[in-house]
Amino acid sequence: MAGGARAAGGARQRAAGERSSRASGSAFDRSRISARAVAPPLEHRMLLTATLCLLAFGAVMVYSASSPRDLVAGQGSGMSYLVRYLMYGAIGLIAMRVLARRGVALLNRQLVTAMLVGSFALLVLVLVPGIGLEINDARRWFAAGPIQFQPSELMKFALVLYVARFLADHPKRIKSFRQAVVPVALVTAPALLLIVVEPDLGTTLVVAFAIGGLLIASGVPTRHLAVLAGIGVIGVLVLALAQPYQSVRLTAFLHPWHSAAGYQSVQGQIAIGSGGLFGVGIGEGVQKAFYLPEAQTDFILAVIGEELGVLGIFGLICLYSMICWSGLRIARRATSRYAKLLASGLTSLILCQATLNVFVVLGLAPLTGVPLPFMSYAPTNLCIMLASVGLLLNISSPRSRSPRLRAVPPESDPGAGRDRRRRRAART
């Protein structure tokens, strides 16, 4: 009788263990399904929406800005720039999709270091006559037929990745100028010098502002930032005075209506003034066809102002504001220090470039040759900006924030542990 009772008790205990195991397994399955079904956060959706709207808007305005001159010059149907914009946009969207799924994990420390070293090598090669393509006395591009590549764009992306990783890995060095700021400057300064030699002062300023934003986000003391800002201002003034065409640009910025070098800035302001509040209509602008140089690249904002008016520019600024809000919120809600700094740096990279372009077109800054992100015809820049958005989407995705779920094995179930303790007590 006692043996039968013990056998019945063991059967009941095994049945209870099996029920608890099935319950824990079903709970794990439900939690895994619910994790998959979590909708992306608001900042994720806003960032993606603003980026796609800017991309579609950019395709329309690139065609509007470039087609008249192509037709007047007899270069086909006027769709050459649009076709290339769409081609590079498709490449950028593929990169954005890949990085949105695997971004932070894919760009590990070894790959970022290799990207940085490769960018330095490309910046040196582009300055070699016969290798780099020279346009308007500037040697900034590699070219193979209609395909062009600008290594300085890859460099600014690699620098943000590298500096964010360095600052995240050494949080205790942040308060020391020698241990935190100097190592960053030793990497950033040679890159900026190579970009200046091309010459490309606009990209130099964008990189400097983006790295400055990263240092602010990491908590570098204000006095260190003031020292860096002073060195940067002195460096810009020296370069402007040392290079004759930069001196002319600075003078033209101060008095654009009294200098031949201020012609482009003046025509841009005339285009915006001609548009008024509502604009003259898409495709109806005159400045882009006969007066405004580089209308589809650096001065596409002037075309928007003429054809869509002040309201069109305001709508564009609203889209960039959505990117700003989304990027800063993504940085705030990121789970790791590296993700926070990376999101801050990428957001600064996009917004500093957009702000500088807007200031130049409005006559509030000297001409620098910086494209408007997602809007201008700038192939390499378009791909890099979309890749940056992909990384931001990856940081904000629910999968990167939620902790990994792990199935609880039946042996570690609390009910099973209590059953084992009862069996030991019965034996004793």
Image (spheres, rainbow, N blue to C red):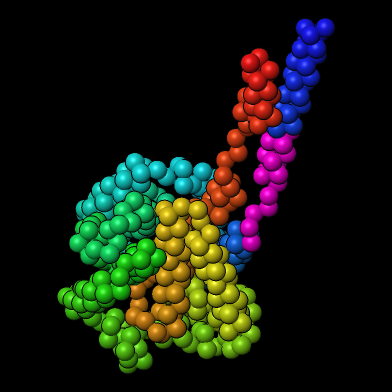
Q: Which residue lies furthest to the front in this view?
A: 428
Measured as percent of width and height from the top left, residue 386 is found at: 50, 56
For the N terminus, the image quarter is top right
Residue at point 42% right, 55% down?
337
> Is 135 contained in the magenta span?
no
Measured as percent of width and height from the top left, residue 355 is found at: 44, 74
Which one is in front, 166 or 95? 166
Residue at point 61% right, 82% down?
311
Asked if 41 appears above or below 276 in the picture, the reply is above
Count of all numbered marks drawn on residues in the image: 0
Residue at point 28% right, 64% down?
175
For the C terminus, the image quarter is top right
Q: Give the range drawn in magenta.
A: 26-42
Which one is in front, 427 or 230? 427
Q: Quadrant of residue 258?
A: bottom left
Which one is in front, 100 or 374? 100
> Is 33 contained in the magenta span?
yes
Please indicate, yes or no, whether residue 38 appears anywhere in the rendered image.
yes
